[in-house]
Amino acid sequence: MKKVLLAFGTRPEAIKMAPVIRALEAHPELQPVTCVTAQHRHMLDQILGLFDITPEFDLDLMQPDQDLARLSARILENLTPVLQQVEPAVVLVQGDTTTTFMAALASFYLQIPVGHIEAGLRTGDLKAPFPEEANRVLTSRLARWHFAPTDNNRKALIREGVPRDRIYKTGNTVIDALHWIQGRIYRGECSDKTQELLSKFSRPFILVTGHRRESFGHGFESICQALKTVSENHPDMDIVYPVHLNPNVQEPVLRLLNNCPNIHLIDPLGYEPFTALMGYSQLVITDSGGVQEEAPALGKPVLVTRNKTERTEALDAGVRLVGTDRDAIVSEVDRLLNDPPYYQQMSNAANPYGDGTAANQIAAILGDEL
Ligand code: UD1
Ligand code: UDP
């Protein structure tokens, strides 16, 4: 059996790695070994529990408001002995976090080949998203296998000189995860907690998330002002906002939005209740990468509180960039809520991120090549 070590640490990496772990478990010649950095703790554990993943190695590295340099150094230092002990045939990393890049770098130093899942996303601006654009570009330089979700991503890698025969267009594993969780929801296998949460929000509602570092400070204040105005303009609607645990997000959101009667600030949700809520929402306001991919697949219009996106495939057909400007956010929400044909057009996006077989494709490619 060839060992495939999956290194990940945050909520979105866990969601997008879970289907890959399952696909590798089902492969006759591959043995998955999971190592979590726990760059996130609570938000990671929510996902590990849902997908029934017990990591073989848990580096437990989260610290409150940890800076990027310290986190990076600790990942390199703590992951290296695990790689030396396991001696995997390949290390798989996902996406663009500090864990992604540092796990790729630690593997490179030990001359272990790296497979990059969700490769080739680019804004072309190292400052947005920060530091994720740099993490992606640098991980691509180190990877042997590049699993690109879309044709645009494949072309971006070719433009950077990645050999064509090392790029595999597989779709995004987030669609595999979404299909799995939707299956549970449609079969009525939702937990009581999810049912209870859904029953709390019987009026039409907007679902909100946000956590981008480049928006800390003024950007977040402006998004909060916009949400406040939206809540006043639409008293018949609710705004449901599971607030990211980063203290730089918690502080402005709780300070500015705590006393608005139709804004519900809640703890980060498990993947099942979150996707169930998204399914019932009118529209989504977010800066999240994963949510930008899931919402069009669920037929939900998305307003993205960023100026640039690396996920251009659904732009104008369901996804609209609104930045962090208060007036731009308010007027785009008003337009969506007051113009039914426009709303309809924005709800009919085709899902450009694959057919839910990305994880099986990745396992099959590794099985053939290792
Ligand atoms: C990280 C990733 C970002 C990804 C996002 C997904 C980097 C640099 N950033 O951002 O790319 O889109 O995760 O959510 O890799 N915290 C907790 N509990 C948790 C998680 C976070 O308390 O379960 C708090 C801690 O104080 C922690 C802080 O949030 O130090 C920041 O976490 P960190 O992983 O560095 O950055 P995120 O903003 O979560
Ligand atoms: N998500 C979740 N609970 C929440 C908010 C988001 O399970 O309260 C899921 C969401 O469905 C998506 C992922 O977390 O799959 C996105 O994570 P995040 O926005 O933290 O990171 P990004 O995708 O921007 O890197």
Image (cartoon, helix red, strand yellow):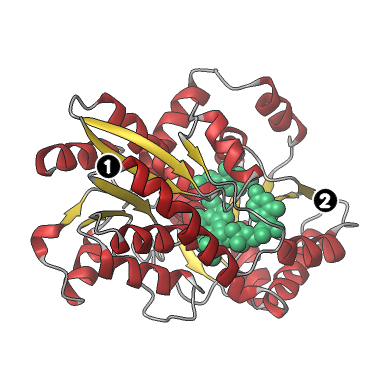
Residue 274 x/y as whole percent: 60, 40
Where does the image place residue 213, in percent across and percent down from the top left? Answer: 60, 71
Q: Residue at x 41, y 54 (%)?
A: 80
Could one spot residue 128 in this view of the protein? yes
Q: Residues within 10 Å of mark 1 (few under 14, many from 20)?
A: many
Query: Residue drawn 74% across and 40% down?
Result: 203
Locate the N terminus by quadrant. top left
Residue 164 screen position, x and y as percent: 10, 64
- What residue lies at 57% left-to-right and 43% top-to-bottom? 44
C-alpha span from label 2 to label 1: 39 Å
Q: On the image, which quarter does residue 194 sit in?
A: top right
Between 330 and 97, the one lying in front of the other is: 97
Which of the pair 187/242 is nearer the observer?
A: 242
Can I make out residue 207 in this image? Answer: no
Q: Which residue is mark 2?
A: 262
Q: Nearer the viewer, mark 2 or mark 1?
A: 1
> Are discs 2 and 1 less than 8 Å apart at CB?
no
The answer to which of marks 2 and 1 sits earlier in the sequence is 2
Q: Picture coordinates of residue 298 (x, y %)?
A: 46, 43
**Residue 358: which numbered mark, if any?**
1
Q: Amino acid at mark 2?
A: Asn
User: What amino acid is at disc 1?
Assistant: Ala
